Amino acid sequence: MREWFCAFDDRIIGFFTRITNKFQRVTNRTNYSLAQTCFVLIVISSLVQVGNYWIPVLGYSSDVLSFFVNGFFGLWFIRLTYFCTKAEERVLLGKELGQAEGNAFMIFDAPMVRLFLLCVGCVGTFLFILNELIGKVDGLFLFRVIDYLFFPAVSSFAYFLAVSSLPPGKSTVQE
């Protein structure tokens, strides 16, 4: 069963590798830039949840636990984006990742963690669509969409970190 999960994870990594390679050829930016883009979505989603504690824009009032959990995730991902910046600089210079960057991304190295985040993101997206179609929805639509983007963005972040970058100089961008 584990082999099936690993094979499925490899296919998803292949999908994200194709996206990253095309992005790197066109922009000369690596998978770490795409991970930072996902990071922006994560932080915005966390800020919506934290802000919902005071101003209920989602149709319900957040509790204290979600306030602290989202605050913690926001701070943790700020730390990870610092390591993404450092890792991208090293990759573009043709150097290996340092031990600090490797340790920071270690939690996303396991295929089961990435697949779990992907499943949670898919279930969350399905529940959002189901809620929008049949549920009585309160709150502002844009803020609800941003709120539900948290786990899809986290799973994309994990998969962009799992991708290997192209060697330096493979971009079509002239400096």
Image (cartoon, grey):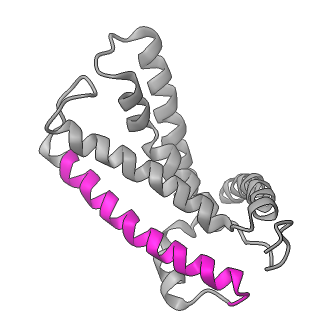
Above or below, 62 against 134 in this view is below
Q: Is residue 161 visible?
A: no
Task: Identify which residue, 98 or 109, lies in the foreground.
Answer: 98
Q: Which residues are magenta?
A: 66-95
Q: Is residue 15 left or right of 122 when viewed as pictured? A: right
Task: Identify which residue, 121 or 30, lies in the foreground.
Answer: 30
Q: Is residue 59 left or right of 167 when viewed as pictured? A: left
Q: Position of residue 73 (x, y in %)?
A: 33, 58
Q: Position of residue 4 (x, y in %)?
A: 72, 53
Residue at 53% across, 66% down: 108
Q: Does 85 lie within the magenta span?
A: yes
Q: Within the image, what quadrant is residue 159 found in?
A: bottom right
Task: Identify which residue, 75 or 126, lies in the foreground.
Answer: 75
Q: Position of residue 5 (x, y in %)?
A: 67, 54
Q: Is residue 52 left or right of 88 when viewed as pictured? A: left
Q: Within the image, what quadrant is residue 137 found in?
A: top left
Q: Does 29 lie within the magenta span?
A: no
Q: Is residue 51 left or right of 108 when viewed as pictured? A: left
Above or below, 98 against 37 in this view is below
Magenta: main secondary structure equals helix
Residue at 61% across, 76% down: 88
Q: Within the image, what quadrant is residue 78 found in?
A: bottom left
Task: Identify which residue, 125 or 119, lies in the foreground.
Answer: 125
Q: Position of residue 89 (x, y in %)?
A: 61, 81
Quarter of the image with the C terminus is bottom right
Q: Is residue 39 visible?
A: yes
